Amino acid sequence: MKHRLLVLTAVVWLSALVEVILRDRYHDMLAQVDNFAWMAAFPILVAGDLLAGAALRRRANRAAGDAGIRRPPIRHFLLAVVLWLWVVPGNGPKLAHFVQALIASAGVWWLLWFCDWRWGSRLSRWATSRGPLALTVAAIAFVSVPPFLVSVRSDTIAWPDTRSLSAAAASKAGVPINPSGGPLLVLLLDELGFKASEPIMRALAAEGFVVSSRANAPVGDATAKVIPAMWLRRPFPEARPCGLAAICSGLDLLDFSSVEVSWPDVDVVGFYHPYCAMKGLRWCRRDSPPSGFGDIRRVECALGRRLQVPIAEACLRAQNTPWLDLVARTEASYWKAPFWRRGGVLFAHLPVPHPPAAGPDASLAEHYAAGIAHAAAMVARSARLLKARAAGMDEGSPRIVITSDHPLRVHEWCTNGTYSAQRCMGADRMEDDAVPLIVGTFGRQVDLTPFRSNEQLFDLVTALRAPAP
């Protein structure tokens, strides 16, 4: 029984570790650091418990020996199950709740000790039943079935799907046809709400573009849910990575490595999703924040924030540095795309106006306003470059499409430890339930009435580049 439970304990722990590794490699955003720490803490705790139990047994009287001390694998297996439930379906503790997570972990550990001491004989009988094996099989299946589905059900997806909206349908919808293939810029500005998008539209209009816009319903409340829905044109409500380039929602899946690009002149810039796994792209960059594991100072600062202890001024100044570095990297990649020299299509998923911004003491409202201004400046520069290119080349007029994944998540930012209650004052005014759909063209306005959700983004993109009937 003892060795059987130890093996099952290791298998449950390994299945949770595989899930964390998949998430980390898929998003490549250093978002699983806390989960990796909890996963590493488990074998250390088990080893310490075994050593403590051995020491206690040597000192205890055999006749009065504690039954709980003689049955460590039962506790360890149950703790592995709790850890699995916490990390896999529960996604682990948030940054702001690290201390509470420590307290809860200690409480669970002592509860397991008490149960082992109080109901040790019953636990021994349960440990020899099929219960532990059934829980282990369920844990393995939950983690391994989605990757298996990727390997056997990964259908090829055409992107953009030129069959989804014919030129005739585009004309009926009031979308102007662009037969000469002028440059088409598609911007997905992360966390841009409709109410906050006015500066973006003004930036386009100031460069001579005719602006069409409407409020769209976001198809999901998180980037992980929205981006796959755009590619698949259907909701993706339970998104979680299930491969290095695949994401699943129940039995539904999107494997970016099975996406075949329909046009030969498509460039992509982005982050968070493995866009560059798509086949047939002319050029692609996917950026990530720089790793901080080699920077002892950053590790100390991160630990201090999680323990909610006063941290040094240098830590306060540098706390947003990883995100700001990601913004800078993604923006640099954006301007390096061949699109700016050779035309074609550029899809760019940019981490603006997504908080945080520079200034460790600024409020969420101030950071978001800075992000909006940054996004508007990028849109203005992009419009100027496209306008200048159109004036000097014999090609179709440029089109710019701008949307977002979801509005600013005020509640999330004000509860995850990034912003204090004081720095969240006034943030409730930024609550929104819609994202913008903005199109900038030269000529007449575009009728966007048929496009009600950002799930339909690439229907619009296809229509804007549809061949003449």
Image (cartoon, grey):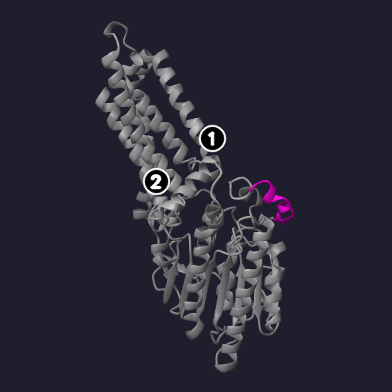
Residue drawn 32% across the image and 19% down it: 71
Please determine whether, in this image, residue 107 is positioned above or below residue 41. above
Residue beneath label 1, please? Answer: 100
Q: Secondary structure at mark 2?
A: helix
The one nearer the camera, 377 or 441, is 377
| Left or right of 379 in this view: 429 | right
In the rendered image, residue 259, in percent from the top left (x then y), is placed at 42, 66
- Which residue range is magenta in the image? 420-432
Image quarter of the N terminus: top left
Answer with the quarter of the image where residue 234 lies.
bottom right
Crowding around mark 2 (Cα neighbors within 10 Å: few <14, some 14 to 19, many 20+) is many
Residue drawn 68% across the image and 50% down it: 424
Q: Is residue 374 magenta?
A: no
In the rendered image, residue 67, in percent from the top left (x then y), is placed at 34, 13
Q: Secondary structure at mark 1?
A: helix
Q: Residue lying farthest front?
A: 313
In the rendered image, residue 72, in percent from the top left (x then y), is placed at 33, 23
Q: Is residue 425 magenta?
A: yes
Residue beneath label 2, please? Answer: 19
Q: Amino acid at mark 2?
A: Glu
Residue drawn 39% across the image and 43% down it: 143
